Amino acid sequence: MGIKTALPAAELGLYSLVLSGALAYAGQGLLEASQDGAQRKAFRESVRPGWEYIGRKMDVADFEWVMWFSSFRNVILFTLSGHVLFAKLCTMVAPQLRAWMYAVYGALAVVGTMGPWYLLLLLGHCVGHYVASLLGQPWLCLGLSMASLASFKLDPLISWQNGFVTGTFDLQEVLFQGGSGFTVLRCASFALESCAHPDRRYSLADLLKYNFYLPFFFFGPIMTFDRFHAQVSQVEPVRREGELWQIRVQAGLSVAAIIAVDIFFHFFYILTIPSDLKFASRLPDSALAALAYSNLVYDWVKAAVLFGVVNTVARLDHLDPPQPPKCITALYIFAETHFDRGINDWLCKYVYDHIGGEHSEVIPELAASVATFAVTTLWLGPCDIVYLWSLLNCFGLNFELWVQKLAEREPLAQMEASLSEQMSRRVRGIFGAMNFWAIIMYNLVSLNSLEFTELVARRLLVSGFPQTTLAILFVTYCGVQLVKERERTLALEEEQNQDKLKPE
């Protein structure tokens, strides 16, 4: 779907104008709806006093976000600051021991947060995977990992293992699921890399240093073991020129994003409105579409902030962690859709690419995507909504390949060949616009609710047809073409940089 041909500047300018006007119009409707609903009885639990000096209330429907930046803010800052401080001291005094320092500090933080019995529980899973890795059978290691993951997702084992946590607190369930789930994925990566490289003879200590690296422990992102081990084993790590400046910029962007979200939630109640379907059904079509779109954008911002903060600490430790996920606004194909780049890389390396190969054949691609979404379903926790989400996204991923294969056959291939390159890009942009909304609807199911997704689909595709449907598709088409133009520009810049690096 990558067309390198540029469109006329006037055409791109028109697309920018249309997109800006549509977003402003839809945003105005969403702002008015937020103001009108602020006093509703159904909003009382999740819309609470915020900036009282200007009379604004705040959307606090996201429990995790509120906890991160209110009651647990100081704990997070203190813990990560301690990690940075001790890491710096160890790097200066005994750089060869810095990986051990990371693991010891992380283990102590886990004990202080979740209790010693929870640490012993995770150590048991680590030892089990280490023993399995000694047998050198990848299928056995992956099977053990799936069984371990299931034990943290399904009753009665999940209830039994949850009893190892000391005390009760607001984020206990989130930290339990995060620490346990990521531990299993890290153990799986260690075991599979050990099977793939038996000559390297990784030890149990290598696994513990990998698993208990605190910045990645509870919320990720996950680095595959081979990458982490290679980077953390450098005795005298050296920073690239300008890297510290990039780290400062990343930290500044994370702070700016947190402030921006705080401001946004004082004016737009995008998480609370969908919970009141009676009120949401009265929104204009444009505002309803903006509400659905903004829910996915917020989930991306939330992931970007979380990974931005964690990655800042990791880069201070001389690591190169996975980057934040690609912005939902720039996604118009299922093959690039993910909300966690680390888990996406893990799935691609050990499941998706391993089964699907080059992803150019229908049957292997179907098998690879089914296996990948089966693992993802287990990771998220099996339930009806997750089953539906996995089914829809698995279908979307395969449908793209089916359409691509169909377009390569006659007479469609001949029809496209008869078009100019600019017209071919425009035609593909139309399909990209439809795909964009398929991505939104398929993921809205899990990020919000099935009932709200049904409301949006009914309004935009049934009662709003054809005016609303075509208007929103045209606006989306404009956005897709602008994204394509940005991708084309970046690709050209990368080619020019590579040409400069080639020897004369």
Image (cartoon, rainbow, N blue to C red):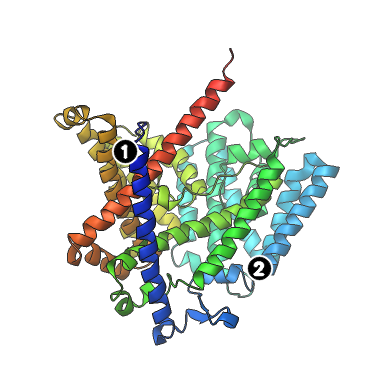
Amino acid carrying label 2: it is Arg
Provide residue 216's location: percent of width, then percent of height.
Answer: 61, 52
The image quadrant that residue 466 belongs to is bottom left
* Callout 2 secondary element: helix
Q: Is residue 193 left or right of residue 488?
A: right
**Depth check: 242 or 174 in front?**
242
| Residue at the disc numbered 2 | 73
Q: Judge whether residue 149 can be spotted in this image.
A: yes
**Camera-side mark, 1 or 2:** 2
Q: State whether residue 500 is above or below residue 187.
A: above
**Depth check: 503 or 344 in front?**
503
Q: Residues within 10 Å of mark 2 (few under 14, many from 20)?
A: few
Which numbered circle lies on residue 193?
none
Q: State whether residue 141 is above or below residue 339.
A: above
Amino acid carrying label 1: it is Glu
Give how far apart the Cα atoms at labels 1 and 2 are.
43 Å
Q: Residue at x 36, y 65 (%)?
A: 26
Q: Residue at x 42, y 52 (%)?
A: 328
| Residue at the disc numbered 1 | 365
User: In what quadrant of the picture does the N terminus appear?
Assistant: top left
Provide residue 442's location: percent of width, then percent of height.
Answer: 32, 57
Q: Judge whether residue 386 can be spotted in this image.
A: no
Q: Residue at x 34, y 36 (%)?
A: 7
Q: Is residue 270 left or right of residue 313?
A: left
**Depth check: 412 or 450 in front?**
412
The image quadrant that residue 69 belongs to is bottom right
